């Protein structure tokens, strides 16, 4: 049935996603360089949790939804991200998983004023991605290995 409008809903970003860890990310765990190489193009989950607001006089509770930031002993903040729904459930089974590409998680980290990403907090695959690497990921750079070591390079523009 049409009503003279050409509207369509955008398809999901990750159709058919079953919430498991992407194989290329699973293979990279344990090698921080390999994780940085895989992360930009794989889906991770950012947990969203309810924060209770003020209770008005009528007795209804207000709640806001928010991404989770952890604050370290040095005062720096980090965004949480998880490789799968299962690893996120180990941390908090009540959190809502929001799928996002790793490079977009890096952008969200910077947008929130955080300086690191904690991947799979509370799990054996726990990985910390620090400030400079977060900035490179957010900028769309790729990490490559060479005989001289590793280097971030600008990725060619998408066609």
Image (tube, rainbow, N blue to C red):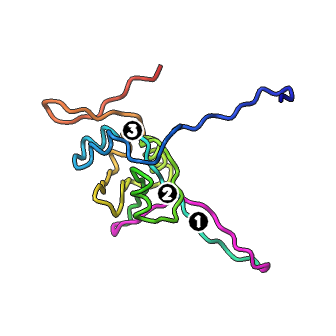
Q: Is residue 73 left or right of residue 79?
A: left
Residue 59 numbered mark, or none: none
Local packing at callout 2 (Cα closer than 10 Å; few below 14, some 14-19, many 20+) is many
Local packing at callout 3 (Cα closer than 10 Å; few below 14, some 14-19, many 20+) is many
Q: Measured along the vertical axis of the image, is residue 13 above or below residue 120?
A: above
Question: In the image, which residues are magenta?
Answer: 57-74
Closer to the camera in the image, 22 or 139: 22
Task: Calculate the distance from the C-alpha at mark 1 to the C-alpha at mark 2.
Answer: 10 Å
Q: State the residue at coordinates (43%, 23%).
A: 157
Task: Calculate the distance from the C-alpha at mark 3 to the C-alpha at mark 2.
Answer: 18 Å
Q: State the residue at coordinates (26%, 41%).
A: 34
Q: Is the residue under label 2 in contact with that under label 1 (CB below 8 Å)?
A: no
Residue position for label 3: 40
Residue 47 numbered mark, or none: 2
Residue position for label 1: 50
Magenta stretch: includes residue 64: yes
What is the number of callouts on the image? 3
Q: Measured along the vertical axis of the image, is residue 13 above or below residue 116?
A: above
């Amino acid at each position: 049935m049409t009503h003279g409008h050409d509207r369509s809903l955008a398809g999901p970003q990750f159709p058919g996603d079953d919430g498991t860890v992407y194989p290329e990310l699973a293979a990279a765990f344990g090698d921080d360089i390999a994780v940085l190489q895989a992360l930009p193009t794989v889906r991770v989950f950012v947990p969203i949790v309810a924060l209770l607001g003020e209770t008005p006089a009528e007795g209804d509770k207000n709640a806001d939804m928010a991404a989770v930031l952890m604050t370290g002993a040095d005062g720096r903040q980090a965004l949480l991200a998880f490789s799968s729904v299962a690893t996120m459930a180990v941390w908090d089974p009540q959190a809502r998983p929001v799928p996002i590409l790793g490079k977009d998680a890096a952008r969200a980290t910077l947008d929130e004023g955080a300086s690191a990403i904690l991947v799979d907090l509370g799990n054996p695959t726990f990985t910390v991605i620090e400030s400079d690497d977060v900035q490179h990921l957010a900028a769309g750079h790729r990490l490559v290995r060479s005989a001289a070591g590793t280097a971030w390079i600008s990725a060619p523009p998408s066609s």
